[in-house]
Image (cartoon, grey):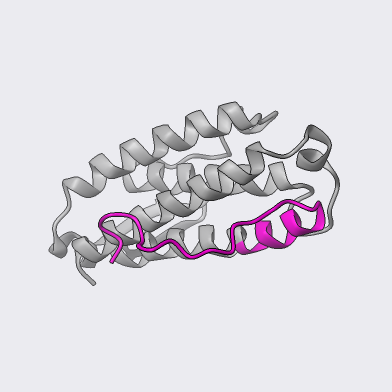
Amino acid sequence: MTTDEIRSLYAYNRWANARFLAVIEGLPDEGLIAPIPSSFPSILGTFAHIVAAEWVWLRRWLGENPTGFPDWLTEPSLARLREKLAEVEAERDAFLGTRGDADLDRPLDYRTLDGTPHRDRLGDLLRHVVNHSSYHRGQLTTLLRQVGAKLGRDRPDRLPEGSG
């Protein structure tokens, strides 16, 4: 895997998150927070998890080791999640912009939220986060259908710039 391929994955990730956020923002409040059995208690909770996980992993790549999720996750709003996601994406783009192919093979030492130490290759962790977000966007698809949201079934003529 190359840094160009990683940047392409993150261009896709940004595009996909934006599409889901647009659908979610069109929901009435009751649909947003309605309890629907899944990994998280609601549509809002599922999207908040995506944003928070992307934040946690970025912090780790930057050499920090968060010991918990950020305070803004306590009572998330769509406006706050949009703001935080934009911050994560901008900071992550800057991080990725300074990496070369050799950096992907380098090990990264980090700690989980409970303090357990781990070491993995940066490239593997970068792929993991895109896959993690895709997995939960799949859950969002099911949750959104359960509240009657209209999901675009049309495939765009082309994917976002830089995503292949």
The single residue placed furthest to the bottom in the displayed view is 1
Is most of the magenta stretch helix, strand or loop?
A: loop
Is 108 positioned to the left or the right of 45 in the image?
left
| Residue 109 drawn at (x, y percent) | 34, 55
Q: Nearer the viewer, residue 83 or 15?
A: 15
| Residue 144 drawn at (x, y percent) | 73, 54
Residue pictured at 34% horizontal, 55% vertical:
160
- The image quarter in which residue 138 lies: bottom right
Q: Which residues are magenta?
A: 138-164
Residue pictured at 75% horizontal, 59% vertical:
145
Name the quarter where the N terminus is drawn: bottom left
Residue 117 shows in this picture: yes
Determine if the magenta segment contains residue 145.
yes
| Residue 148 drawn at (x, y percent) | 79, 53
Residue pictured at 25% horizontal, 44% vertical:
95
User: Image height check: is 43 above or below 164?
Assistant: above
Is 138 positioned to the left or the right of 132 in the image?
right
Q: Nearer the viewer, residue 31 or 104?
A: 31
